[in-house]
Image (cartoon, rainbow, N blue to C red):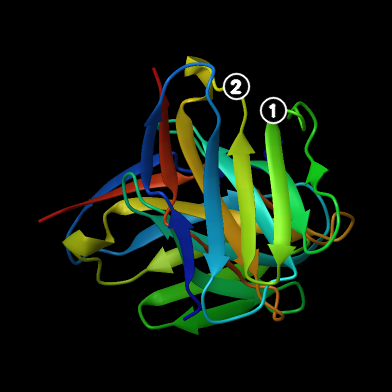
Amino acid sequence: SQQGEEDPQALSIQEGENATMNCSYKTSINNLQWYRQNSGRGLVHLILIRSNEREKHSGRLRVTLDTSKKSSSLLITASRAADTASYFCATDDRQGAQKLVFGQGTRLTINP
Amino acid sequence: GAVVSQHPSRVICKSGTSVKIECRSLDFQATTMFWYRQFPKQSLMLMATSNEGSKATYEQGVEKDKFLINHASLTLSTLTVTSAHPEDSSFYICSARSQSYEQYFGPGTRLTVT
């Protein structure tokens, strides 16, 4: 079953702008991960944030985690056309311990 | 980063036949691998968790006799779709979990059942 919602479902912005995607989840988690998927391809791991972390950076990516609100956000700064993809969050819930449960994803389109 | 491969990348088979998909972790050992199915424009749905040397754990609604999973070694898990039907046509993706709990995904296998 799906863990939660991603918001927005689709986002279209101009190249150079920042893109923000949000993810909410339902259960207590060990960590939350963000992935990118280009159309018809596998998933690329972007970043993992642990439940005791609040913010993490990797290049142009910034991820925040608010465990009190059970939500996370992914910010892509200075977007590029190559960032066009679907982005998914996935949580590793404490009870399940092992399995990842994915959000619905956000389809991001960067217009040149 | 860690690499996970899948083979084949695409397969077309006739209804009623069986298809085997391989998932390999190339540069790390994975005691746990996962199999997902993804329909067009939808998210990934976990099918089963595969643990090396033991039986797979299937998610609710997934038929274990139809989707046979074997995790024979720390670097290889296989998914066999038995007696495939057109509704089994989908994108199947495996992932392997590292010791630091990150999951690395294979490139996926596009299965088309005619």
Q: Nearer the viewer, residue B99 or B5?
A: B5
Q: Nearer the viewer, residue B92 or B79?
A: B79
Q: Is the residue marked by circle 2 packed among few (<14), some (14-19), or many (20+) residues within 10 Å? A: some
Residue occupying the point 43% across, 45% down = B109
Q: Is the residue marked by circle 1 packed among few (<14), some (14-19), or many (20+) residues within 10 Å? A: some
Q: Chain of mark 2?
A: B
The quarter of the image holding the C terminus of chain B is: top left
In primary-sequence order, the first of circles 1 and 2 is 1
Residue occupying the point 77% across, 78% down = A52
Q: What is the x, y in percent for residue A102?
A: 61, 48
Residue occupying the point 85% across, 50% down = B55
Q: Quadrant of residue A36?
A: bottom left
Q: Which residue is mark 1?
A: B66
Q: Are marks 1 and 2 in contact (CB under 8 Å)?
A: yes
Q: Is residue B98 left or right of residue A46?
A: right
Q: Nearer the viewer, residue A101 or B95?
A: B95
Is residue A46 in view from this perspective? Answer: yes
Numbered disc 2: secondary structure: loop
Q: Quadrant of residue A14?
A: bottom left
Q: Chain of mark 1?
A: B
Numbered disc 1: secondary structure: loop
Q: Quadrant of residue A92?
A: bottom right
Is residue A102 in view from this perspective? Answer: no
